[in-house]
Image (spheres, rainbow, N blue to C red):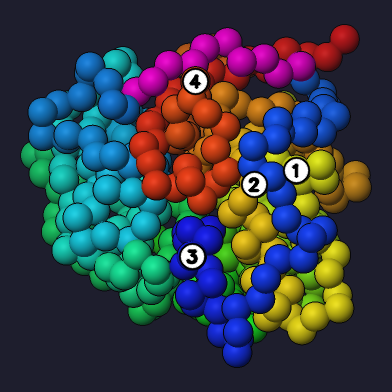
Amino acid sequence: MRFALAATLTLCACDAAPTLDAATTSDASEAPPPPPPAEPGRHTVTLTDTRQVIPGPGLPAETPPGNSNNNLDIVRHDGRFYLAWRTAPDHFASKATRIFVVSSTDERTWRFEASLGLDTDLREPRFLSFHGRLFLYVARLGTNPLSFDPQGMSVTERSADGTWSPLEPFYQPGFIGWRARVSHGVPYLLAYVGGEHEYRFDNLPLDVHFLTTMDGRTFTGVNPANPVVSHGGGSETDFAQNDAGDLFAVIRNEPGDETGWGSRVCHAPADHLAQWTCVSDPRKYDSPAMFWYDGEAYLIARRNVTATGNFDLGQRMYDRTRQAVNYAIDYTRQPKRCALWRYVQAEHRIAFVMDLPSRGDTCFPAVLDADAPNERVVYNYSSPIDGPDLPWYLGQRGPTLIYRHVLRFEPRR
């Protein structure tokens, strides 16, 4: 969700902006409800370290953080860690937005790599390290803070001399790239089109494309005959594969469709990766990041801090537009967390594991393998984790910081 409460009402495509029913209102001054019961699978997961990275003492002078530091990605490439993040006056679209890129050997002292700007909003930085080459993809949007205006994706590549090529458009106009990764030796990109419809509440569909590439710049469908794996309300999507290559995925379904609102929980067999079978989940897993570890498909995504955690509040008495707006308004009023979940493979559902230190405006995670084989490093942004527990629409005004967390996975006894 990219908009404050006022923006949601402004952009509503109905005759009059609906008001929230009593059942959907909340008092942000109340203490948040406890998290749902944890459902650990094969592992006991513990948080062993948390530290603030941005703003931080190890950054180069060329990358002064703004008030809002949020959308990010990190990757290992050629013996270094490469970190990219969006910095701007706040969470909303601005031509002052920059994407900073830094690198490090120890994740403490960072070297300047690039500062990217196009006098328009940039988001969703995504690295792809493949065959010795390092690409960074970003989404171009507009400059109106009350609007979500996808323009397309751009790519830059790091050359052997350490410079980065100018940002160039690629794939098709209007797409937003969500997750780039190499899995089982194959490079993939998940991207969606139609994002402008999410906040116009016009009930027009979005398509998620599941793509691969040979050169980092030209993309085709994993199924060349049809790149679309989701048609309806789906947008932000990620997946993990088990050792046999079977795929487990989560798709955010914010504007809703005939299946409801929230998310889609999907799977596909290794020999038909582009044929996804999905079920609905009333929770909305914003900013999904998935990874496979020792028999489990884990998910890191935003958690709605309410008694049920649901985005879909079960309203069916209104038309779809009014229901979607009601859900969006209610969601902005609630506190948020960034949480670790797992895909329960036998039941094709998502189970809660634990919260990461987070609050306010939070959750755009990236995951790294750690030096210890049973640990994973998670980079994530949040309102100050020692600050007040703000409703989301207040947290989006900033400030937001970037933190580094270490998760340890031990076999359950």
Q: CA distance from mark 3 to mark 2?
A: 15 Å
Prevailing secondary structure of the magenta residues? strand
Say whether residue 192 is magenta.
no
What's the amino acid at mark 1? Thr
Q: Are marks 3 and 1 in contact (CB under 8 Å)?
A: no
Q: State the SS at label 3.
A: helix
Would you say 293 lies left or right of 144 here?
A: right
Q: Which residue is tagged 4?
A: 386
Q: Which residue is tagged 1?
A: 306
Q: Are marks 1 and 2 in contact (CB under 8 Å)?
A: yes
User: Around disc 4, counting alpha carbons within 10 Å, would you say few (fewer than 14), some (14 to 19), or many (20 or more)?
Assistant: few
Q: Are marks 3 and 4 in contact (CB under 8 Å)?
A: no
Q: Which of the marked residues, 2 or 4, is nearer the chain's N terminus?
A: 2
Q: Which residue is tagged 3?
A: 6
Magenta span covers which residues? 44-53
Query: What percent of the width, then of the height, locates residue 36?
Result: 82, 33
Instruction: Residue 334: give its label.
Output: 2
Would you say 324 lies left or right of 65 here?
A: right
Q: Which of the marked residues, 3 or 4, is nearer the chain's N terminus?
A: 3
Residue at image position (30%, 33%) is 82
Q: Is residue 283 visible?
A: no
Q: Which of the marked residues, 3 or 1, is nearer the chain's N terminus?
A: 3
Residue at image position (36%, 37%) is 399
Q: Is residue 131 above or below residue 255?
A: above
